[in-house]
Amino acid sequence: MMFGDPNRVAIEIGELEFSIEPGKIYVPIQFLIFGTPIGVWDDRLQLITALRNMEDFLENRADRRDDSLRNVDSRTFFDRTFTDYYEGEYIVGVVAPNLRDRFHLSEIASDTICDHYGIAVADVSADRSRIVVKEFDSQRIILDGEFETAEFDTMCQEFVDWAHGIYREFRK
């Protein structure tokens, strides 16, 4: 199952695996960013974890806007949206969600991606989003690009709607 455009930004979900434990559904998940797969396809996580994380990510959409990130280099972008969270600069303003909840797309797939990649997304204008991906094994920035914010939001919402549909069917 694919949500979004794999040549721009997409989330791919593999075959659902139903646990013998009631209500638990496991799934492989990866992102495709500008045609590059990001994730570990052989790893699984609970679908409910990805759903809740994506809902949190969407809920914090308004706080993801930061025009100052549009023209900075890749490393500065990643440091200000991702690395600073782990170095103690959790909150920009008193009421703002922390950096992870605003910018860390990799959190959607939990450890299946977080152990290997950092993916940070920020809205850099009213209609454009920027994404930067860092591979932790090599410590290199491997992707940096922009796409339409609406395209990204649609991908996220389609995933949420689909996952809710799976759980509605599962509970019947």
Image (tube, rainbow, N blue to C red):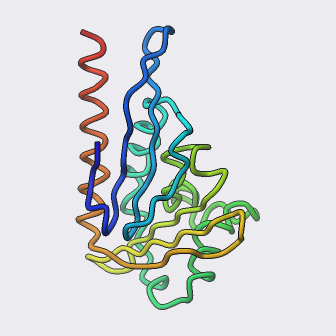
Vertical position of residue 108 compared to residue 69: above or below:
above
Q: Could you say which is closer to the camera, residue 87 or residue 75?
A: 75
Vertical position of residue 30 compared to residue 70: above or below:
above
Quarter of the rendering containing residue 61: bottom left
Count every numbered label the image shows and give the total. 0
Q: Could you say which is closer to the camera, residue 98 or residue 34?
A: 34
Vertical position of residue 13 compared to residue 164: above or below:
below
Quarter of the rendering containing residue 81: bottom right
Percent across and percent down for residue 21 are 51, 9
Classify the position of the C terminus by image quarter. top left
36 with respect to 161 (left or right)? right
Give me the residue at 43% from left, 31% from top.
47
Percent across and percent down for residue 62 are 36, 62
Give me the residue at 33% from left, 57% from top.
10
Q: Could you say which is closer to the camera, residue 50 or residue 112?
A: 112
Vertical position of residue 99 compared to residue 161: above or below:
below
Percent across and percent down for residue 8 are 31, 69
Q: Which residue lies most toward the right here? A: 87
25 with respect to 101 (left or right)? left
Classify the position of the N terminus by image quarter. top left
Give me the residue at 57% from left, 56% from top.
100
Give me the residue at 25% from left, 20% from top.
168
136 with respect to 28 (left or right)? right
